[in-house]
Image (cartoon, rainbow, N blue to C red):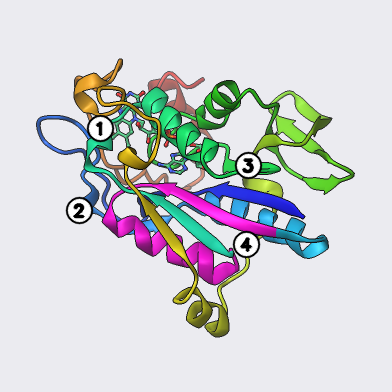
């Protein structure tokens, strides 16, 4: 049986306003609608496909506040079997290294795991390094930026896509995988799936249930911090060039004025 854990994160919806809290520059989670990160829907989908191709169990793991329960339910309604929710106020403001340390400790307590599937980059933090840090902390191989993935005979293999090209890669299980945008189109939860999700087990842990020690997580213990933040200015309307015979020249003059040509 393939025991798969999918790491999922609840993030502010890209369609609602994202902002940082005044003062400490942590994410203002109340300011935006929260959703299961789309890349994590794809990670769940991939785990379900691997499970459906053979035998397996899919557990989702999420570190997040109370409202992350909604993201967990979404993953369960897609078809994941159970969930672990690390929910501890002391995690607030943790940086990448601390978050990964906490996740690695939870994973260590989850028994034998064959495959850990992550998104390659969360759409809020955008550190893109949790999978690599987990590989380091857990001492397991990692395959990153995967656009295809299959598991057979104790080996995970598939295509890794980067700006440089496409590479065939493989790693012996247990391994950590991060998936990219092209991996699949995630399924929509069915009505039956939504109803079934309500009864699926969700184990809620605090840091006291892990080997994480006091002082290893949280904003005050973080090794890095955001010290200022300047939102991008909103997009302004473009310039319209009416073509009255000189349209080409007008566009060229505009581009020259902008120092683009
Ligand atoms: C406003 C803001 C400020 C931040 N400031 C800092 C800072 O100053 N220094 C710093 O180091 N970090 C900072 N972070 C990063 C923050 O700590 C990260 O959310 C966290 O460290 C994980 O990094 P990431 O989400 O960018 O992960 P990525 O590496 O981009 O995520 C990849 C994958 O890892 C998994 N994953 C990530 N987070 C979780 C989770 N919570 N639960 C389960 N799976 C998860 C998911 O599968 C995800 O798709 C900031 C984030 C935000 C939103």
Q: Is residue 125 magenta?
A: no
Q: Is residue 118 visible?
A: yes
Tag of residue 28: none
Q: Residue furthest right?
A: 153
Depth-wise, is mark 3 or mark 1 nearer the camera? 3
- Spatial CA span between label 1 and label 2: 15 Å
Pick whichever, 151 or 1, lies toward us: 1
Q: Nearer the viewer, mark 1 or mark 2?
A: 1
Q: Quarter for ligand 1?
A: top left
Q: What residue is rendered at 25% in x and 22% in y?
A: 215
Taking the spot 36% from the left edge, 29% from the top edge, the residue there is 212
Dot 2 surroundings within 10 Å: few (below 14), some, or many (20 or more)?
A: few
Q: CA distance from mark 4 to mark 2?
A: 27 Å
Residue 234: where, in percent of width, then height? 27, 42
Residue 133: image location, x then y, percent: 53, 24
Image height check: is 27 above or below 79?
A: above
Judging by the rendered image, the residue that carries numbered circle 4 is: 186
Residue ID for mark 2: 30
Viewer-side label of 4, 1: 1
The answer as to whether callout 1 falls within 8 Å of ligand 1 is yes
Image quadrant in which you'd find residue 132: top right
Q: Distance from label 3 to label 1 (Cα)? A: 24 Å
The answer to whether marks 3 and 4 mark residues whose Cβ atoms lie closer than 8 Å is no
Which portion, as a residue range, is magenta? 57-80
Q: Find numbered disc 4 in the image and state the secondary structure of the residue it sits on.
A: loop
Q: Quadrant of the N terminus?
A: bottom right
**Label placed on residue 93:** 1
Marks 4 and 2 close (CB-CB < 8 Å): no
Q: Residue at x 32, y 46 (%)?
A: 237
Q: Which residue is mark 3?
A: 116
- Sequence-wise, the earlier of marks 1 and 2 is 2
Q: Is residue 145 left or right of residue 17?
A: right
């Amino acid at each position: 049986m393939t025991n798969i854990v999918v790491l999922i994160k609840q993030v502010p919806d890209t369609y609602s306003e994202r902002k940082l809290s005044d003062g400490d520059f942590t994410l203002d989670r109340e300011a935006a609608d929260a959703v299961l990160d789309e890349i994590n829907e794809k990670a769940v989908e991939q785990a379900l496909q691997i499970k459906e191709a053979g035998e397996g169990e899919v557990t989702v793991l999420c570190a997040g506040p109370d409202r992350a329960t909604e993201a967990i339910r979404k993953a369960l309604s897609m078809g994941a079997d159970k969930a672990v929710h690390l929910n501890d106020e002391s995690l607030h403001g943790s940086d990448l290294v601390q978050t990964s340390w906490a996740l690695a400790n939870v994973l260590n307590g989850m028994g034998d795991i064959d495959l850990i599937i992550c998104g390659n980059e969360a759409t809020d933090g955008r550190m893109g390094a949790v999978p690599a840090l987990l590989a380091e902390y857990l001492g397991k191989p990692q395959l990153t930026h995967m656009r295809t993935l299959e598991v057979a005979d104790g080996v995970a293999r598939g295509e890794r896509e980067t700006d440089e090209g496409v590479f065939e890669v493989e790693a012996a299980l247990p391994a950590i995988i991060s998936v990219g945008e092209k991996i699949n189109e995630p399924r929509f939860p069915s009505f039956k799936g939504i109803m079934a999700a309500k009864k699926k087990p969700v184990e809620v842990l605090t840091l006291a249930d892990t080997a994480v020690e006091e002082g290893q997580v949280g904003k005050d213990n973080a090794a890095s911090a955001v010290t200022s933040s300047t939102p991008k200015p909103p997009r302004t309307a473009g310039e319209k060039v009416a073509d009255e015979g000189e349209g080409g020249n007008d566009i060229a003059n505009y581009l020259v004025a902008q120092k683009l040509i």
